[in-house]
Amino acid sequence: MKQFLVVAYDIADDKRRAKIAKTLVQYGLRCNESVFECLLPESKIRKLKQQLEKLADVREDIILYYYLCLPCAMKRESLGRRPGFKPEVIVV
């Protein structure tokens, strides 16, 4: 079973920010400069969080994880052009 996860971050250092973004691209779709939508099984979420924990500096950076249930993910809205998961492929 997969979980819909939104990851948002504010990283102080350019090099760390680039490494974190490069890692997140492997797991989800970038929908904003510092926001990714991911559809992952729990095992991959754990792996992603472990990787990001190694890259981030908790004294300067923040990474937020938002877990969305299926009804919530289906209700998300946007204005303008952005990539994202189509509601019919979300299975939570």
Image: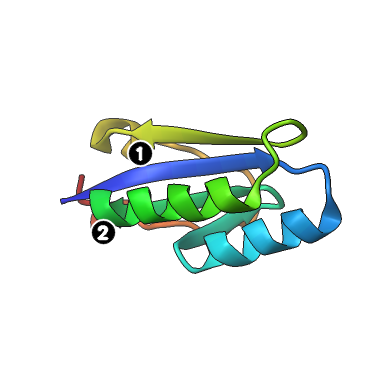
Q: Position of residue 82 (x, y in %)?
A: 60, 57
Secondary-structure class at tag 1: helix
Cα separation, mark 1 vs mark 2, equals 11 Å
Quadrant in the rendering for residue 17: bottom right
Name the residue beneath numbered marker 1.
Answer: 73
**Residues at marks 1 and 2 touching, judged by CB atoms closer than 8 Å:** no
Q: Position of residue 80 (x, y in %)?
A: 65, 50
Q: Who's the residue at 54% across and 59% down the image? A: 24
Q: Nearer the viewer, residue 87 or 5?
A: 5
Q: Quadrant of the C terminus?
A: top left
Q: Nearer the viewer, residue 74 or 41?
A: 41
Q: Is the residue 59 above or below the residue 44 in the image?
A: above
In this image, 80 relative to 38: left or right? Answer: right
Q: Position of residue 10 (x, y in %)?
A: 72, 39
Q: Nearer the viewer, residue 28 or 21?
A: 21
Q: Is the residue 15 above or below the residue 57 in the image?
A: below
Name the residue beneath numbered marker 2.
Answer: 89
Let me know if residue 78 appears in the view: no
Colouring used for the render: rainbow
